Amino acid sequence: MEHNQRDANKQASREPSSGGPSGAPGCERTPEDPNRDSPDSGNPQPTGREPQYSAGYTMIPPNASKRDQLLRDAQKEEEDCKRWKEANRVHAVHTTPETLGGSATLSEARERQQTDLRYSKQQKMLKKKDLDMKKRLEEEEVYQKMKDIQREKRYKVRRELDSFYLDRVNQAFLDNLEGQPGGSVKETKEGFGHPPWNPPGQQLTPAQLNQHPDQSSSDCWTHDADPDYDWALEKLMTSFPDYNRAFLEDILDQCSNDCEQAFTLLNIS
């Protein structure tokens, strides 16, 4: 009996410590409901595909029929793949064995290698020479095309000038025949003299049109006596061999014996 009384006192002394005198919620322990998962409780057991809740997670059971169908399809595809691999397996390739390096022997190969090494420098020089020759020929071809273009331009300008001079002479001849019958011969002779050069589109001055032959001859005599004029004329004739001497003299006269200006005018034309 004393033993039972001691056990009761111990249990009484243990109960206040477990509950806590202060009654703080952190020290309290929620009692578990033993009938929570029992069949007789308010939560019935899940049936079919109803979600199941466990430890904060929700689990939805899969559709059994659909799952089985997917498994059967996957198994069938795997079997078809295996059968295709077996049917299309690469068979062993049987080739006739050959000696590596061709039909030449080792001594012949080494001799050929030494020969190529010995003449490699000469081959490089010949190749470079051929490339330089091709490049030079291409440059000469381009330069020749440019020269041909410039020559055609000069010929075109020359033809235009000749046509202009002939038209002017014919017009002067016709005007003389219509206006002055007595002086037609004299004017015609004067008109057939080589006129001073004039670029196309530029009008001649009355002094140039009415220049007397004696005056032109005196100018020529003055030019012959001038060494600078002769030097400039020779320089123009050397630089432009396609033009005649009279044409270059007219150019030099219009440029006031300025060789640089004559050069510029001829290059532009």
Image (cartoon, rainbow, N blue to C red):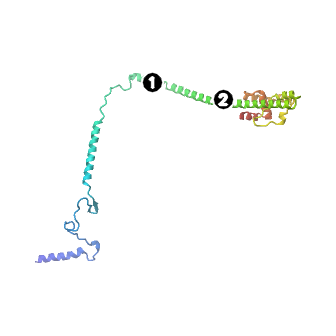
Residue 225 on image: x %, y %? 84, 28
The residue tagged 2 is 148
Give me the residue at 53% from left, 25% from top: 126
Q: Is residue 170 visible?
A: yes
Task: Please tell me which residue is depicted at 14% across the width and 76% down the height of the picture.
Answer: 6
Q: Residues within 10 Å of mark 2 (few under 14, many from 20)?
A: few
Tell me the amino acid under the disc marked 2: Asp
Residue 59 x, y percent position in the rendering: 27, 59
Helix, strand or loop at label 1? It is: helix
Residue situated furthest front in the rendering: 178
> Closer to the camera, 171 or 253?
171
Query: Is 168 left or right of 92, judged from the image as shown?
Result: right
- On-image quarter of the N terminus: bottom left
Quarter of the image with the C terminus is top right
Residue at the (24%, 74%) spot, across then down: 19
Residue 164 in picture, x, y percent from top left: 76, 32
Q: Is residue 128 left or right of residue 222?
A: left
Q: Amino acid type of disc 1?
A: Gln
> In the figure, residue 128 lies in which quadrant?
top right
Image marks 2 and 1: residues in contact by CB distance under 8 Å: no
Horizontal relation, residue 160 to residue 51: left or right? right
Mark closest to the chain's N terminus, 2 or 1: 1
What percent of the width, then of the height, locates residue 88?
30, 36
Q: Nearer the viewer, residue 64 or 224?
A: 64
In the image, residue 70 above or below residue 127: below
Mark 2 → mark 1, Cα distance in angstroms: 51 Å
Give the secondary structure at mark 2. helix
Q: Mark 1 highlights which residue?
A: 114
Point 57% across, 28% down: residue: 134
